[in-house]
Amino acid sequence: MFDLLELDYEIRRKRDSRNLKRKLYKSKKVPLFFRFSKQFGALKLYGIPKKNDILIGLITLLLVLSSILVVFGPIITDFMEYSNELAEQKIASRKYKNQTAFNFLMNTGKKRLVDGRINEAYKEFRLAYAIYPENKEVNTLIIETLSILCEREAKYCLELDKFLSINI
């Protein structure tokens, strides 16, 4: 009989220790306002937050956003200054390259015009005109070369008329 009591005592003790362990490891459910629903794969609303909770949440959000602005504000301004400087450098580089190409085309066009290679000179002046269409020297040189070419071939007379109608 004592064996049965002893056995019964052991069984109860093991059962109680398992229940204690379960209680210790059992997580307490924290009330959430939004929970992820496994069934539909979406957020579901549980409970209604109190006004104080909403106010605390908004204040926390405001503090987080303002601290982000304080931390990243100087970085953003430095980046903006750097990008503006880079854009100005690109514009200056493009202007320099355009000016260099324009000067080269004008010099080679004039040299070809003097050498009597009028067709090639006209092509050079057209390329220079594509870079700086407002340049008066290019316009006069194109008109001169087109008038010379117009005397040789009639197709250049049409181009001369188009060019004169655009630039006058």
Image: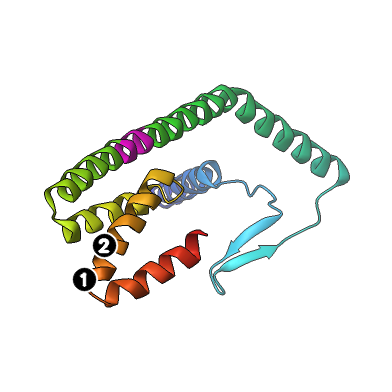
Q: Give the residue number, with chain letter if any, for mark 2.
A: 148
Tell me if residue 59 is in the magenta stretch: no
Q: What colouring style does the render use? A: rainbow
SS at mark 2? helix
For residue 95, which numbered disc appears in the image?
none
Category of crowding for the residue at label 1, using alpha-carbon neighbours closer than 10 angstroms: few (below 14), some (14–19), many (at least 20): few
Q: Position of residue 35 (x, y in %)?
A: 63, 59
Category of crowding for the residue at label 2, using alpha-carbon neighbours closer than 10 angstroms: few (below 14), some (14–19), many (at least 20): some
SS at mark 1? helix
The furthest residue to the front = 151
Q: Give the residue number, with chain letter if any, for mark 1.
A: 152
Residue occupying the point 21% across, 71% down = 152
Decide: marks 1, 2 in contact (CB < 8 A)? yes
Q: Which residues are magenta?
A: 93-99
Which three-letter amino acid code belongs to the residue tagged 2?
Ile
Q: Splitting the image into 4 quarters, where does residue 41 fall?
A: bottom right
Q: Is residue 23 left or right of residue 112?
A: right
